[in-house]
Image: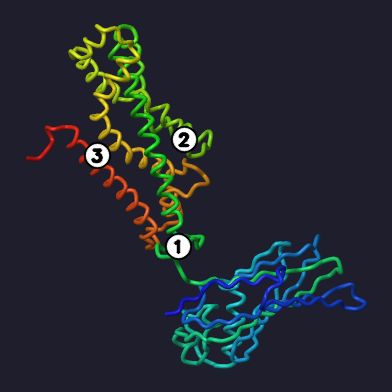
C-alpha cells in the first residue's frame, strides 16, 4: 500500500497550493479573509489526523468568525463548521471534532437516507468515496484526487488579520517505528549509542585507573596512608550509591556530563581498591621490587614503572566488564526521569514509552528496541571481558 505522507500548508508562507485574499467590506469597518488550500491526495489509506492552526492578532471580544468548506475530487462541497476563535493562536482538531462529524453525517444522511454505522469517522467521510453501502458498513475506499479546503474568516477590524496552517498527518513511519510525537525511533536509538558508550567507557576508564592508583599508593606506603584510604573506601562502600545519585539529580537537574562527573566522584573509592591493594601487598615482596629499592629507585618510579604495569593486565577485564553497569546506570536514571533533559538516550526512550502507555497500547517495539540495544551492549562487553580474562589469567584458559 501507498501510505500517506504528512502535508503542511501555511498561509504565512508563500508556497504552491495556498492562496490568501483579503476583502474590505465597505461601510462596516470589517474585512473578509479568504484562504484556500489545494493538495493532491493519491494514497491508499486516509490520513491519521487533520488539524488547523489559526494565527490572529485580534484583542478583546472581537474574535474572528470562521467558516470551513471542504471540496472533494468529485466536486462535492460540504460546509464543515462555523467557528469562532477562542484565542489568537487557536487550534481546531478537525478529525476528532464532534461538530464536524455531526455536520458531515447530516449532509450525507440527507443524500443517502440510511442508518450510519458507528465506525464512520470524520476522516473516512472527508477522504472516502461515500455510498449507501459504505455509510452502513463503515468501510470506505479512499477517493483519490485534488482536494480543497476553504477558510472564510470575518474579522471585525481593519487592523486585524488572520492566517492558518493546515496539517494533514500521514501514517508513514521509520524502520524502527515512531513515538507519540511522530518522531522516528531510529534517531534516538542511533544517537543514543555513542552517548551510552561514551558515558560507560569514560566512567569505567577513569574510575578503574583512579582506583588502581589509589590502591597501589595504599598498598605501597602502608601505615596511616593505608589506614586512611581503607577507612574512606569503607565509608564510600556503605553510602547508598543510587539513592544518593537520584537525590542529586532531582535537586539540581544536571546534564549527562555533570552526571558523569558525579558518578566518577562517587565511584573513586570503590570495592576494587581492596582487591587491587591485595595484589600490591604481594608484589611488594617480589625480588625485582626489592632489587629496585636496593639500587635507589624512587617510590614514583617503583609505583608507575614496576607495580602498575604488573597489575594492569588483571585489571583490564574488570574495566571492560564494568562498562555495561555504567550504561545501565545512566539508562536507569533516564528511565526515572532524572537523566539529561535534552539528549535522546536509550533510557529516555523507555521513559517516554512508559509515560505514554506504550505497553498498554500494544506498542511493544517502543520498549523492546531500546531494551535490546542495552542488552546487546551488555552482552558485547561481557563477552569481551570474558575473552580478555582468559588471555590474562592462564588458569581460565581451556585445554
Please state, as top left, top right, bottom left or bottom right, where the C terminus lies in the image: top left
Please state, as top left, top right, bottom left or bottom right, where the N terminus lies in the image: bottom left
Residue under the point 46% across and 57% down: 187
Q: Which residue is mark 1?
A: 178
**Looking at the picture, does residue 32 appear above or below residue 364?**
below
Q: Is residue 380 toward the left or the right of residue 190 in the image? A: left
Q: Quadrant of residue 387?
A: top left
Q: Is residue 376 toward the left or the right of residue 260 in the image? A: left
Q: Which residue is mark 3?
A: 385
Tags 2 and 3 in contact by the CB under 8 Å rule?
A: no
Q: CA distance from mark 1 to mark 2?
A: 28 Å
Q: Nearer the viewer, residue 380 or 344?
A: 380
- Disc 3 is placed on an element classified as helix
Q: Which residue is mark 2?
A: 259
Q: Picture coordinates of residue 50 (x, y %)?
A: 58, 72
Q: Quadrant of residue 386?
A: top left
Amino acid at each position: 500500500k501507498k501510505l500517506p505522507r504528512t502535508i503542511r500548508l501555511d498561509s504565512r508562507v508563500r508556497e504552491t497550493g495556498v492562496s490568501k485574499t483579503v476583502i474590505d467590506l465597505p461601510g462596516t469597518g470589517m474585512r473578509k479573509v479568504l484562504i484556500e488550500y489545494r493538495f493532491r491526495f493519491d494514497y491508499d489509506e486516509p490520513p491519521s489526523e487533520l488539524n488547523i492552526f489559526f494565527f490572529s492578532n485580534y484583542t478583546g471580544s472581537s474574535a474572528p468568525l470562521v467558516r470551513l468548506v471542504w471540496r472533494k475530487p468529485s466536486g462535492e462541497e460540504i460546509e464543515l463548521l462555523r467557528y469562532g476563535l477562542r484565542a489568537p493562536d487557536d487550534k481546531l482538531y478537525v478529525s476528532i471534532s464532534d461538530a464536524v462529524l455531526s455536520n458531515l453525517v447530516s449532509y450525507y444522511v440527507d443524500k443517502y437516507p440510511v442508518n450510519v454505522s458507528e465506525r464512520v469517522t470524520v476522516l473516512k467521510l472527508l477522504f472516502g468515496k461515500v455510498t449507501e453501502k459504505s455509510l452502513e458498513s463503515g468501510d470506505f475506499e479512499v477517493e483519490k484526487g485534488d482536494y480543497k479546503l476553504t477558510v472564510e474568516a470575518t474579522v471585525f477590524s481593519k487592523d486585524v488579520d488572520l492566517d492558518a496552517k493546515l496539517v494533514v498527518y500521514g501514517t508513514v513511519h521509520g524502520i524502527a517505528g515512531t513515538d507519540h510525537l511522530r518522531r522516528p525511533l531510529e534517531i534516538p536509538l542511533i544517537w543514543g549509542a555513542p552517548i551510552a558508550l561514551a558515558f560507560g567507557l569514560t566512567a569505567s576508564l577513569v574510575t578503574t585507573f583512579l582506583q588502581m592508583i589509589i590502591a597501589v599508593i595504599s598498598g605501597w606506603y602502608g601505615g596511616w596512608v593505608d589506614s586512611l584510604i581503607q577507612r574512606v573506601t569503607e565509608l564510600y562502600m556503605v553510602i547508598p550509591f543510587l539513592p544518593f545519585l537520584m537525590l542529586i539529580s532531582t535537586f539540581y537537574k544536571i546534564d549527562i556530563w555533570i552526571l558523569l562527573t558525579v558518578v566518577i566522584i562517587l565511584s573513586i573509592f570503590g570495592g576494587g581498591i581492596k582487591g587491587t591493594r591485595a595484589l600490591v601487598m604481594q608484589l611488594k615482596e617480589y625480588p625485582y621490587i626489592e632489587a629496585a629499592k636496593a639500587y635507589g629507585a624512587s617510590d614514583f618510579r617503583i609505583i608507575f614503572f614496576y607495580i602498575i604495569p604488573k597489575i594492569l593486565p588483571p585489571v583490564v577485564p574488570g574495566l571492560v566488564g564494568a562498562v555495561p553497569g555504567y550504561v545501565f546506570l545512566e539508562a536507569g536514571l533516564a528511565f526515572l526521569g532524572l537523566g539529561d533533559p535534552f539528549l535522546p538516550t536509550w533510557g529516555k526512550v523507555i521513559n517516554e514509552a512508559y509515560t505514554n502507555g506504550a505497553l498498554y497500547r500494544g506498542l511493544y517495539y517502543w520498549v523492546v528496541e531500546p531494551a535490546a540495544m542495552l542488552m546487546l551492549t551488555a552482552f558485547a562487553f561481557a563477552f569481551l571481558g570474558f575473552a580478555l580474562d582468559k588471555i590474562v589469567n592462564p588458569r581460565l584458559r581451556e585445554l
